[in-house]
Structures are given as C-alpha cells and as structure tokens.
Image (cartoon, rainbow, N blue to C red):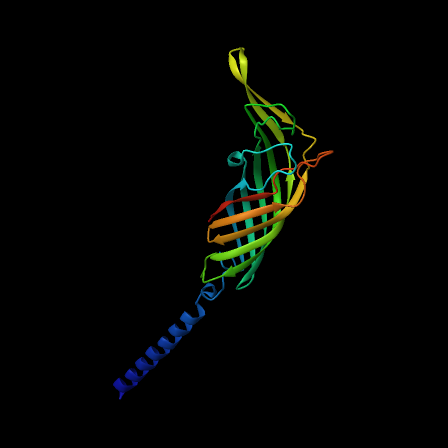
Amino acid sequence: MNIKKYLFVFIALLFSSALFSQEVLINETPDSLYSVKKWGPNRSNYIHFYVAYGMAAGLPEGNAFDLKYGLSREWRFGLRYKRRICNHYAMGLDLSIASYRYRFAQYSSKQFPDSLLHDKEYLQLPTVGLEYYNRINFGRRGDKIGNYLDFGAYATYTYSASLTYNDKLTTPFQGASKVKTELSELDYITDTQWGFKARLGNNRYVLWASYRMSDWLKTTGNHVDLPRTTIGLEIGLF
C-alpha cells in the first residue's frame, strides 16, 4: 500500500514539474523575436552615404565661351535619407557637398570671363545642397533597395568660387617657367541655384541627371550662362 502511495506522489510531482517548465519557457520568450525592424534598405527608414560623378552635357548659353567637355565635371559626396510610405513609394531628403569645375576652351572668339587666352583656364564652384525627392520602386527586392526611379527638386549654395588659369612664361622668372593665378570673390557668380534631378537605380548603382533652372552667372548685356544639364553615375556606400 505504501509503495503505491509513493509512486503516485512521484508521478504527480514529475507531471507538475513539466507543466511549470513549459510555463517558464513561454514567459521568457524575447519580444525582439516578434518585433519589426524600422531601419533597413527596404524598411520604414534608411540612411546611407554615396559618391557621384557627373559631366556637363548641355551647351553654354550665349556665344561668349566654349567648354572642354571631357574636363568639365562634378564630384559629389552626400548623405541620403529615405522614408518608406508603402511598398512601391517612398520619399526622402538628400544633403550633399559638391565641386563643379568648368574648363574653358581657349579660342580667339572667347569673351567670358575675358578675352585673354591661357594655356589652361577653369572655373571652380564648390556647393552645399539639399534635395527633396520621391521614389517609385519596382520589381522584387526583399530587404534590399532594389530597382527604383527618383525624381525631385534641389537647391544649392555656392561658396568660395574661383577662376584659375595657368600660363607658361616665355622668360623664366626666379627659376620658374610656369605661373598659376587664382582669382576669388567673383562678383559674377550667383550664390544660390535650384533645379530638378532624376535617378534610375539598381541597389547601389545609379544613373542620374540634373537640370538647373536658375542662372549661375550674373551677366549684363548679352545673356551668358554655364550648361544647365549634367549627367553621371553614382555609387551608394552601404
């Protein structure tokens, strides 16, 4: 009789221990396993750096100068934020710094910024910019940026603009045969610019184009301005 009583108590304790252990496992399940990530390439928020290179593609306005297009370019480094609204639409902001360089061809018809001819002459325009854009996603992407089309508007501020030209000296001066001159505080450069930009991207690789609506040069008399269109490539740093 005593053996049966002890066996019954042992089985009851074993069964209650199993139930208690199961309850602890349920209570200790981490909530993070069931939470949705808010930051990521295809999440609600995403931010990343990028570097871009572009070349002048449009013609100068007016007949006062011409450009060497292969040497007229833009370098840009930026930080881009994206806010996902739904599966196929997002919007965001882009903060960037850029350096534009326009290389002037040295023809006898040159009138801007003056008619003097040099061995090398270029206009350097550093800027800081802010862009608002809309993004349309298409195709499968999982937790990646995937394929997309961006279109938006931008504004930039130009600071420390300079005109530089190099010349060879017919007679060496103090042992030097070349001279480099840099002019700053140029009064014919506008401080602010704005325009539109579009991007076609596949993950980190992007083809982009921009069109400037505002004038970059202040001129009197005949209208003169730099090319408004720039096209280039971009690589996302992520």
Residue at point 54%, 15% (across, down): 169
Residue at point 62%, 23% (across, down): 116
In the picture, the quarter occupied by the N terminus is: bottom left
Q: Is residue 71 visible?
A: yes
Give left or right: position of 10 versus 158.
left
Q: Residue furthest bottom?
A: 1
Q: Residue furthest right?
A: 221
- Residue 185: name its quadrant: top right
Q: Is residue 40 visible?
A: no
Question: Whole-percent x and y of residue 155?
Answer: 64, 45
Give left or right: position of 65 versus 70.
right
Q: Nearer the viewer, residue 177 or 235?
A: 177
Question: Whole-percent x and y of residue 176?
Answer: 52, 14
Q: Nearer the viewer, residue 158 or 149?
A: 149
Residue at point 31%, 80% (across, down): 10
Question: Whole-percent x and y of residue 179?
Answer: 55, 18
